[in-house]
Amino acid sequence: MYKLVAIDMDGTLLREDKSVSDRTREAIKAAKAKGVKIVLASGRPVEGINRYLEELDLISKEDYVLSYNGSLVLNTETKEAISSDILSGKDIHDLYKISKELDVNIHAFSRTHGLITPKTSTYTEVEAEINGIKINEMDFNLVDKEDEVVKIMFIDEPEILSKAADNLRKDLYNKYTIVRSTPYFLEFLNINSNKGTGIEALANYLDIKKEEIICIGDADNDRHMVEYAGLGVAMENAIEDIKNISQYITSSNNDDGVAEVLEKFILNI
């Protein structure tokens, strides 16, 4: 019996208009009623997840959320951190220098300052709009090296970002977890952080075995949790790499793919 279902948001739970379908909402409600933990697992900051937690009735002392691609795992009511693996201001200095060498835009999420960038670009504005947060422009050279930073992102047009990704120094992959969450976001996390380690930390906290976990996703940043899960599920709209490592392919995010999984494997409909 599955006891926990981790669900990516953008491209998975959410339709293209960023809404949750009635069928999916009802399936989540029914799964919760059976005692199954429903956990949203997103690259977004908590501020960008909260309204969906409220809509799906997932704010309580018994509910949890993965934010920033697993860098922070929190209780949704108390905001207590179950797991926290983050970066520092020094990483901002290092990656800012590299971003200039690669001629790519950059922003980051600071525990102190929120969404920060040395120069506002189109995709920083996209990030702010999606999550309902403000942009704080600041000189990255002046960021305190001890500042707590959750994640750092190269953000640009897909073709520019692909070129930058191809030219990244190989040693960076030994220093950071690096994931392409969308065609225009390349994310740098603590080397110990990803959605898989976040789900594993929560599972250990809740005493749930990996065989009792379903993880559903569509993009490169979902890879680790789809691999970790007892049942890894790819959306029909997922990238091929995620489909190749999954045990089940469900319908697309626009066609109630999450509801299909819950109905088939939890609700036995």
Image (cartoon, rainbow, N blue to C red):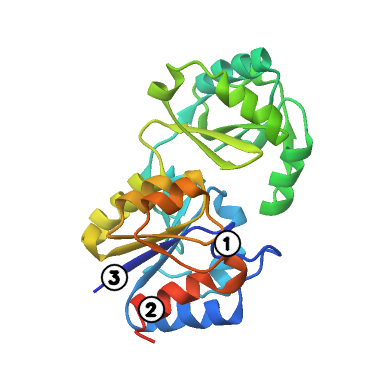
138 is higher (above) or lower (below) than 238: above
Kindly state the secondary structure of the residue where label 1 is placed: helix
Q: How far apart are marks 3 and 2 (CA)?
A: 14 Å
Q: Image quarter for residue 135?
A: top right
Looking at the image, is mark 1 or mark 2 earlier in the sequence?
1
Which amino acid is tagged 1?
Asn
For disc 2, the marked residue is 264
Q: Which residue, given by chain and number where applicable, does mark 1 sit on? A: 50
Q: Quadrant of residue 153?
A: top right
Label 2: element kind:
helix
Q: Nearer the viewer, residue 169 or 249?
A: 249
The residue pinned by badge 3 equals 3
Instruction: Tell me the mark number nearer the camera, choosing from 1 and 2.
Output: 2
The amino acid beneath tag 3 is Lys
The numbered dot on residue 42 is none
Q: In this view, does 127 lie to the left or right of 246?
A: right
Q: Are marks 3 and 2 in contact (CB under 8 Å)?
A: no
Is residue 132 something that shows in the picture? no
Q: Do the residues labelled 3 and 1 touch (CB within 8 Å)?
A: no
* Residue 150 in picture, x, y percent from top left: 51, 37
The residue under the point 56% across, 49% down is 45
Whole-Å distance between the Cαs marked 3 and 1? Answer: 23 Å
Mark 1 neighbour class, 10 Å CA radius: few under 14, some 14 to 19, many 20 or more: some
Return the disc, 3 or 2, that comes first in the chain's sequence.
Answer: 3
Q: What residue type is labelled 2?
A: Lys
In the image shown, does 214 or 89 lie closer to the viewer?
214
Label 1–label 2 contact, CB within 8 A? no
Q: Which of marks 3 and 1 is nearer the N terminus?
A: 3
- Determine the CA span between mark 1 and mark 2: 27 Å
Q: In which quarter of the image is residue 211?
A: bottom left
